[in-house]
């Protein structure tokens, strides 16, 4: 009984992780701008805020701001 009760929070956490969206920054780094835009639109207060955050992420990733493709090739920087 005690073991079963202790497993309940773990199950709730596992289900929550499956429903959690991917990070917009990670999506942009993988070249998936369309998916990043969808996630930012869901999690931002307004469309303007989502576009501003996307522009900042694209600048950090080295993607031109005028690029509006859903999928782009991201060149890996060697430092």
Image: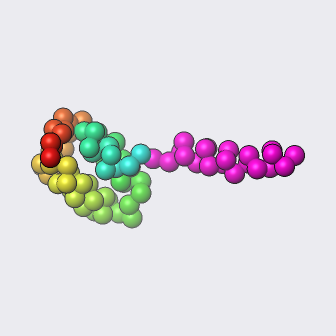
Q: In the rendered image, is residue 70 in sight?
A: no
* Of 29 and 44, the residue lying toward us: 29
Q: Is residue 49 left or right of residue 59?
A: right
**Mostly what secondary structure, the magenta segment?**
helix
Q: Is residue 42 magenta?
A: no
Q: Is residue 25 left or right of residue 74?
A: right
Q: How many numbered circles does the render carry?
A: 0
> Which residue is drawn at the image coordinates 24% and 54% (left, top)?
57
Q: Position of residue 24 (x, y in %)?
A: 34, 49
> Which residue is drawn at the image coordinates 54% and 42% (left, top)?
18
Q: How is the image coloured?
A: rainbow
Q: Is residue 64 left or right of residue 54?
A: left
Q: Position of residue 71 (x, y in %)?
A: 24, 36
Q: Is residue 64 left or right of residue 71?
A: left
Q: In the rendered image, is residue 59 in sight?
A: yes
> Which residue is drawn at the image coordinates 68% and 44% (left, top)?
11
Q: Position of residue 77 (x, y in %)?
A: 15, 43
Outermost residue on the front side: it is 79
Looking at the rendering, the stretch of residues picked out in magenta corresponds to 1-21
Q: Position of residue 20 (x, y in %)?
A: 50, 48
Q: Is residue 16 magenta?
A: yes
> Which residue is drawn at the image coordinates 16% and 38% (left, top)?
75
* Of 46 and 22, the residue lying toward us: 22
């Amino acid at each position: 009984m005690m073991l079963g009760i202790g497993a309940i929070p773990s199950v709730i956490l596992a289900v929550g992780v499956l429903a959690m969206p991917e990070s917009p920054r990670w999506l942009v780094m993988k070249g998936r701008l369309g998916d990043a835009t969808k996630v930012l639109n869901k999690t931002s207060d307004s469309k303007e805020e989502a576009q501003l955050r996307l522009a900042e992420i694209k600048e950090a990733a080295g993607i031109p701001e005028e690029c509006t493709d859903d999928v782009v090739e991201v060149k890996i920087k060697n430092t």
